[in-house]
Image (spheres, rainbow, N blue to C red):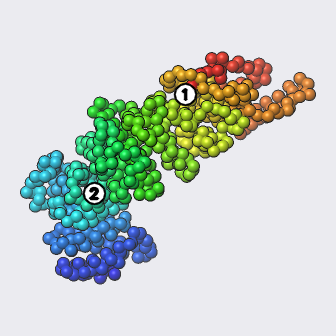
Amino acid sequence: MDLQVLIEQMETGEQDTVLTVLQSFNKQMSQCFTFSREEKMDREEVKQQKHLGELVMSFLNRELQPPCLLTCLETVRILSRDKHGVDPFISCSAMSTLAGYAGIATVCPATLVQGQPAEGHVDDEEEAAEGSSTMKESCCASENPDQEVIVEALKSICNILLHNETGQVVAAELQLIKGLAKRLKQSHNPTWTHEVRFFDLRLTFLLTALRVDVRAQLAQELHGIRLLGNQLDAALGLSWPDRLETARAGFEGIPPDQLPPLSRQQTELAMEILKILFNITFDTNRRKVDEEEAAEYRHLGAILRHCLMSQSDGEERTEEFHSHTVNLLGNLPLPCLDVLLMPKVQQGSIEYMGVNMDAVNMLLDFTEKRLERGHKLKETLLPSLNLLTESARIHRETRKFLRSKVLPPLRDVTHKPEVGDSLRNKIVRLMTHIDTDVKDCAAEFLFVLCKESVSRFIKYTGYGNAAGLLAARGLLRGGRGPGIYSEDEDSETEEYREAKSRINPITGVVEEEQPNPMEGMTEEQKELEAMKLLNMFDKLSRTNVIQPMQLDMDGNMREMTTKDLHKLTHNPVIQPEDPAHSDSEDEAQ
């Protein structure tokens, strides 16, 4: 339909006419999500589209019949898909109108002065429920019982926030997050349809993703952890056999692997909640939390453990669900991760040292799947690998279990650590990955499983693979990292003991003996070859092709100058092996 004709029909102001032409427009544009235009037509079409939006908004401020109201909101939703056409919807009054129809208006436009909220806005749930007669009169709509209207208004606001920064600012000033939080508290109320609940959560996610101030407001003022934890509890239909132990309501006592999969709607709601919680807990693991906060995070952690052990409708959706769960687990304060180990050992559970390792084993399986896929490792693998690393660092049982799976006692010393299909081989290969974050994370994981012992780390990875982390830590001379770990028994195998003296520490394997390239040379010839090599290094260094490095007394790398090279030719220094850091070090898990 021609926009100019549509505008002319709209300007008549008759509801029946408006209803007819907008229904036709909505049907024609229902599947239009991109708005590419020719440059010559662009300005005129955008101008007409904006004018149409203004006319629709003016209609929404009138008393409308339900069919006309719903159709107008559908038109706003379609027009707000275009980032160039949202101008009519981003004013304070327009956003307030849409918020009113969405049932989340808490601040009247009249109370905003120069874009700042006034003192008279609704501050708590009781005031919001009562409301003042002035506010009811001046605001275009209160909570609307028509849930189709609510959904259309919510979708429109979501589109506006996605496309326009001014709309984001206005939404924050109108305190939409308070209206959303008020309705989210009704998580157990069956009145609301799935669509209302889903788009409430989607809008909350957008507000917390795009506005730092709203993120902080939801987390602190509106007690977002508790609020959204209750939402997640309701969406999953949980019961609590014990304080920090969950079960599916109606399926108590049934092992997780025998539970029916979550429905598509349950998973959709749960994933939106997980994304919002991720936004508002983004910096939690970097700061200390008090006892009350720690209790909330442990309660949330117990729910996340249930998410991790649950399946959804289909493998792809299950993996996406688990991915959001792992991302959020990584935000929890590290001491609160002990909830992963708290459930009692039941029939069919994976037990290690008397502890239920089902959740840790699930995390390890999830990590291995991502590793095998090899796609966008930084985004897909690092959250779970970091989570396993930090869990192993603070929980002895987790570290010993993971080491038994990833670094079992070494028997095969004929293949390089990076060669093979075991999980250890795959992670060692990552230690030379082109992405620094990926290789550092992989190295850190194995280093923690080795209790930050340099000799043990080299034993399982080879010095060549380990050198990057050791250089960064100043541990190239050996020793241990700063971590505090228990002392346990030796775990060397007979096969390793027999081959130990013949293992090349650089590659980590027993290699065939190679002929000595200097065999048959006189001392003068050897010295001549050494000087040639030194001169080549010097030349490459002078032309900045390479930068020779050497270890200082602290085990850190530093640049080697020409003066250092000259000293080495006249007074070579061979560092003796430090007996305190030899391979005889305790090899326990």
Numbered disc 2: secondary structure: helix
Give residue 114's position: percent from left, percent from top: 21, 53
Quarter occupied by residue 541 = top right
C-alpha distance separating marks 1 and 2? 48 Å
Give residue 408's position: percent from left, percent from top: 59, 34
Q: Which quadrant, please, contains the C terminus?
A: top right
Q: Which residue is mark 1?
A: 589
Residue sitting at x 29%, y 61%: 195
Q: Residues within 10 Å of mark 1 (few under 14, many from 20)?
A: many
Q: Which label sits on residue 197? A: 2
Residue sitting at x 21%, y 71%: 69
Residue sitting at x 22%, y 78%: 18
Asked if residue 49 lies left or right of residue 374, the reply is: left
Tell which circle, 1 or 2, labels the residue nearer the N-terminal end.
2
Quarter occupied by residue 346 = top left
Quarter occupied by residue 255 = top left
Residue type beneath disc 1: Gln
Asked if residue 420 lies left or right of residue 371, the reply is: right
User: Mark 1–mark 2 contact, CB under 8 Å?
Assistant: no
Q: Which quadrant, please, contains the N terminus?
A: bottom left
**Closer to the observer: label 1 or label 2?**
1
Q: Which label sits on residue 481? A: none
Give residue 53's position: percent from left, percent from top: 28, 70
Residue 189 versus residue 222 in the image, above or below: below
